[in-house]
Image: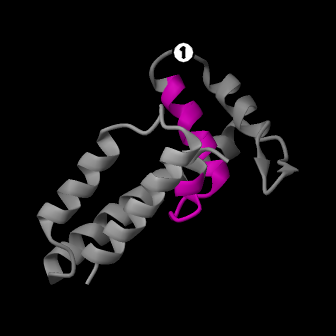
Amino acid sequence: MSFLERLVEQSSLTPRQLESLTSYLRVALGEIKLKEAASIASQGKTKGIPTKPLTIGSYYRTVSQARGNIRESLVTVVIAIWLGLLKVEDARRLFELMESGTGDLSDEEQERFMQVLQALLDRIIL
């Protein structure tokens, strides 16, 4: 399981939404066409079971749902800051930690990173 997939397990995104967002970014960058992105998302698996093919409409709805989930998550962070449950500086540190990049980490380093991330989340959320 990839590092990103491990993070998705703890997020409000589904594996299919992650896959759709990833291919949607490639569409936005002009690397692939929308039809190809829907095809890529259709080839994924959910819990080891092949997923059903996506129409372009279903693919776009999945992308929209994922974007909505991200939006809701960010608003939740804003609410937590507003209520004093989360400090802006702690949120900033968390985002900077993620920005530092995790793509080149070994499995052992990813495991350590996940432990640090969990400890940080446990500590900063009152």
In the image shown, does 89 or 105 lie closer to the viewer? 105
Q: Is residue 85 magenta?
A: no
In the image shown, does 82 or 88 lie closer to the viewer? 88
Could you tell me which residue is drawn at 59 percent across and 62 percent down? Answer: 9
Q: Main secondary structure of the magenta part?
A: helix
In what quadrant of the picture does the C terminus appear? bottom left
Side of 114 relative to 92 (left or right): right
Side of 95 relative to 30 (left or right): left
Q: Quadrant of residue 20?
A: top right
Could you tell me which residue is drawn at 12 percent across and 62 percent down? Answer: 89
In the image shown, does 97 or 30 lie closer to the viewer? 97
User: Looking at this rendering, what residue extends furthest in the front direction?
Assistant: 108
Give the amino acid type for the residue marked by disc 1 in the picture.
Glu
Secondary structure beneath label 1: loop
The correct choice, above or below, for 33 with respect to 66 in the image is above
Number of residues whose C-alpha sits closer than 10 Å to that of mark 1, classed few (under 14), some (14–19) or many (20 or more): few
- What segment is highlighted magenta in the picture? 6-27
Q: Is residue 16 magenta?
A: yes
Could you tell me which residue is drawn at 31 percent across and 61 percent down? Answer: 74
Side of 120 relative to 34 (left or right): left
Could you tell me which residue is drawn at 37 percent across and 37 percent down? Answer: 101
